[in-house]
Amino acid sequence: MGYFRPAIEAMTGYVPGEQPPPGTPVIKLNTNENPYPPSPQAMAVLHSLDSEWLRRYPDPYGREVRQAVSQGLQVPEDWVIVTNGSDDLLNILIRACAEGHSRPVAYPTPTYVLYRTLAALQPAQVIEIPYPENYRLPLDELVAAQAAVTLIASPNSPSGHSVPVVDLGRLAQRLSGILAIDEAYVDFADTSALELVQQHANVLLLRTLSKGYGLAGLRLGFGLAQPELIAGLFKVKDSYTVDAVAMAVGAAALRDQAYKDQRAKQIKASRTRLIRELRRLGFTVPDSQGNFVLATVPMGSAQALTQALKQRGILVRYFNQPGLDDKLRITIGTEAQNQQLLEILQALLANAHSLN
Ligand SMILES: *Cc1c(COP(=O)(O)O)cnc(C)c1O
């Protein structure tokens, strides 16, 4: 007998983006972190915590975070589940709802690769439906799949497009399973599907503090859905996966919406400038609703360009898969970081022979 279940033997593990230790002198534009620090109010709470917070088990219900979410988004507290990042909630969702061929997982591609990994772990059958070139939601195909869990990232990564809320509403209406809308990048977008949670009992909205709030290292996320759905997910959640420090600091960050909004505004302004300048250098760059852009390289190989940038201290994300292998996903950095990226790109492209 092998050590592992056949599903584990057969799968490839998720490969996270490179995470150099803090203090490494790199410009890190590869995993969509916020380039700005978290709210000073959140940092003040972090510094005020004493040993009692570590001695005791954390609140398994995440009440302080639920309360902050409830106040910020005007939803009742029992419509909120608090998790160890939204990856934890994705894991809970798949474990709770998907299984084998009778309860498949469906999603349009390209999207967040973790969806496939989590389904493979379960294991649950995966139905991947490619987006058309214009990134319209493949509504009929997703409905035809009738998956136990349908996952839509909006804004989507790595494409950067948002799915219109009306399309998500139509999808929710026509699915008998759960529609999970992953809003990891909602803080940089013009729209949210929050209203669908009120309108549809099968909609789960996933949010995280990793991107908009600059707290990727803290590991805090939450889900919004009607109470029956939340209660089912709660059965699968381990009691103490969200630690006391994360909840206290995260709740403070959630209460400081003004700070988050101001940073998001800055990043969106930088996004506009970065897209314009990349286009000027010859990249093909669609508009983005996230804190990143997906840029098709004007010449040479995207992989070689990724390596050349890395040698010069800039990390970007390259996906070695069809449809993405001529593109770079670049996180929006600070103005100074974006400027440095542009200067190095310009120099590299001027020496295009070095990029093959
Ligand atoms: C970053 C990201 C997440 C993960 O967020 P965490 O809360 O850090 O686990 C989930 N979904 C998408 C689409 C993401 O890009």
Image: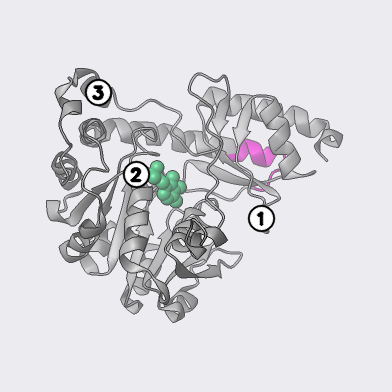
Depth order, front residue of 119/85? 119
Depth order, front residue of 257/207? 207
Q: Which residues are magenta?
A: 275-284
Q: Residue at x 34, y 49 (%)?
A: 88
Q: Residue at x 62, y 24 (%)?
A: 340
| Mark 2 vs ligand 1: CB below 8 Å | yes
Local crowd size for mark 1, using a 10 Å CA cut-off: few (<14), some (14–19), many (≥20): few
Say which quarter of the image contains residue 39: top left
Residue at the disc numbered 3:
46
The Cα atoms of the two marked residues, 2 and 1, are separated by 26 Å
Quarter containing the C terminus: top right
Local crowd size for mark 2, using a 10 Å CA cut-off: few (<14), some (14–19), many (≥20): many
The mark nearer the N terminus, 2 or 1, is: 2
Residue at the disc numbered 2:
85
Secondary structure, magenta segment, majority class: helix
x%, y% of residue 154? 42, 56
> Is the residue under label 1 in contact with that under label 3 (CB below 8 Å)?
no
Residue at the disc numbered 1:
321
In the rendered structure, does residue 353 fall within the stretch colored magenta?
Answer: no
Q: Residue at x 46, y 45 (%)?
A: 290
- State the SS at label 3: helix
